[in-house]
Image (cartoon, rainbow, N blue to C red):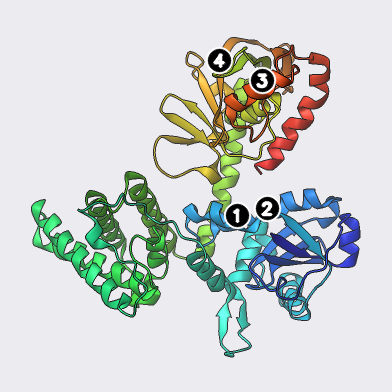
Amino acid sequence: MVIIAVENSLAQHLHINSQIMSPSELLDTNAWTIRVAGEFMIIMNNLMSFPVIVRHPQRFNDSRSFMTAFKREFLQLLEISSIPHAKIRMIRDAQFGKVAFTRQIQPETQQQLQKYQNLMIGPNSIIDWEKNPSNAEIALQLAEQTQIINQTTDEEYVVMDIFEDYSITDFKVPSHPELNEHNRRYLYRSLSINDIMNATAVGEKILDDYEEYLEERNKSESIIDRDLDCAADYIGYCEALGESVLDDLTLIYHYFINYEKLHNERPTDTGFRSKSDAFREFGKFLRAEDLFSSEDYDKFVQAVNQGIKDLNSKQRMYHLQRIIRDMQRQVRNQREHAIQYVNKQYTIYVELSNYNPKMWRRFTVSGDTRLDMLCFTILAAFNADGNHLFELQQGSVRYQLPIFDSGFGQTKDITQSWVGDCDVSHDFHLIYDFGDMWDFKIKFEEIKPKRIPAHTSPEIIDGFGYGILEDIGGVTGLAQVAKDDGSINSQLNITEFKKKWARQIEKIHNCYE
């Protein structure tokens, strides 16, 4: 549960019902406090002092709209921070569960929030406002340039370093080897005093087998030495953190991010390429030894690439500004790309697979409808709540929201494609809730010019059946309910459907922001 402490005036503005919390709950990784500073809201984590910036607090008149903005800004900050992409979704899920508000604000938290306010808009502000920084850029500057003191040890810590440590220690992306007689010898899991000895022995065994693996592939002596040195250095880094190479696939990212600090040197561009090749080879070895699955290998390589990319930036803030410019350019390109489809209207037929009698909808959408919005439209049409994961499939290609992208396989960003991009000669499948496995078969029936060239909302034509019921056990459970409830299998009331469809689409859209 995430706890958010707010001042009385803001609590009244957001219509918040506050709760009484114990002092221990207010000093936790899931506890935050809000400070309104002019046109900004500073939302700071109580334990780590990690800031999130939201602008124009007056535009929020309820807690839900505020939480949507908070979540969006938090995710954008994670994407440009020193956090492995594979962990962003994990951190998001840990931070944004059930929300509770309180008006209990600690004095120490107020003092730190005041420091952030001074650094933002005070006379000694560290923000270069002429560059028109984004909310994420402001927050990252504050986190990277602010130190806090541990009252117990009197040591100073950089806020961003504290948050990076949180991402390392609290979230892990472990490999999942299928244990067999071949690879079991690499594993140690005892809790005895011999753990360190066991870890060292396992590391030595991995390196011995890795050397044999490289020799069998006729690698040159220089390549073998390079690859073994990189592997040994990384294994030592993992052991120093009390981990093995299997406990967290993304530790390799932090290894690269902290490379200069660990080795007191910075590799050249050639050196980066060499290390990238070395760790790719090490990952292939771990896969060959059944310690990595193919998915594990892809996640490991993704972390390698991201770590090298982030470290190789001359300055992190320069890298951030480049990302911001790329995002702005991407938005412009999206608009230019989508405009070519604005004058086309698509008639779409969607049917719930494996259910009898057929439950279906027929509706029209504009060609410039993005594929994620198409999915929200379909889910709303079949009475879904939007509380589960989903993906759009066509053959072996899978369209996913960026935050859910696993980083392997033939996946595409669902926010980067439009209905007009679709190959309408083949059916699509929208898979919703990977437990109940609702499968909606999508068929493009007709394409014709639109009478009104401006963007229009989807229009329902006809349909049959009430829709799905969440967490009912899929089509089998729905069929059981339909035996007692005749409204499940009935003609769709178009008039009533139209009244609530647009609201339900927007509701589901907000669930995935």
Q: Are marks 1 and 2 in contact (CB under 8 Å)?
A: yes
Q: Eyeballing the image, is 250 above or below 263?
A: above
The numbered mark, 4 or 2, whose residue comes first in the sequence reads 2
Q: Residue at x 49, y 43 (%)?
A: 405
User: What residue does disc 3 label?
Assistant: 366
- SS at mark 4? strand
Q: CA distance from mark 4 to mark 2?
A: 34 Å
N-terminal of the pair, mark 1 or mark 4, is 1
Q: Which residue is mark 2?
A: 71
Q: Is residue 464 left or right of residue 270?
A: right
Q: Are marks 1 and 3 in contact (CB under 8 Å)?
A: no
Look at the image and tell me in which quarter the C terminus lies: top right
Tell which of 482 and 87 is nearer to you: 482
Q: CA distance from mark 1 to mark 3?
A: 33 Å
Q: Are marks 1 and 4 in contact (CB under 8 Å)?
A: no
Q: Residue 348: x, y in percent?
A: 62, 15
Tag 3: Cα neighbours inside 10 Å, few (<14), some, or many (≥20)?
many
Of the residues under marks 3 and 4, which one precedes in the sequence?
3
- Residue 122 image offset from top left, x and y in percent: 76, 74
Q: Secondary structure at mark 1?
A: helix
Q: Which residue is mark 1?
A: 92
Residue at 63 percent of width and 68 percent of height: 29
* CA distance separating discs 3 and 2: 29 Å
Observer-side mark, 3 or 2, equals 2
Tag 4 residue: 443
Question: What kind of residue is marked 3?
Answer: Ser
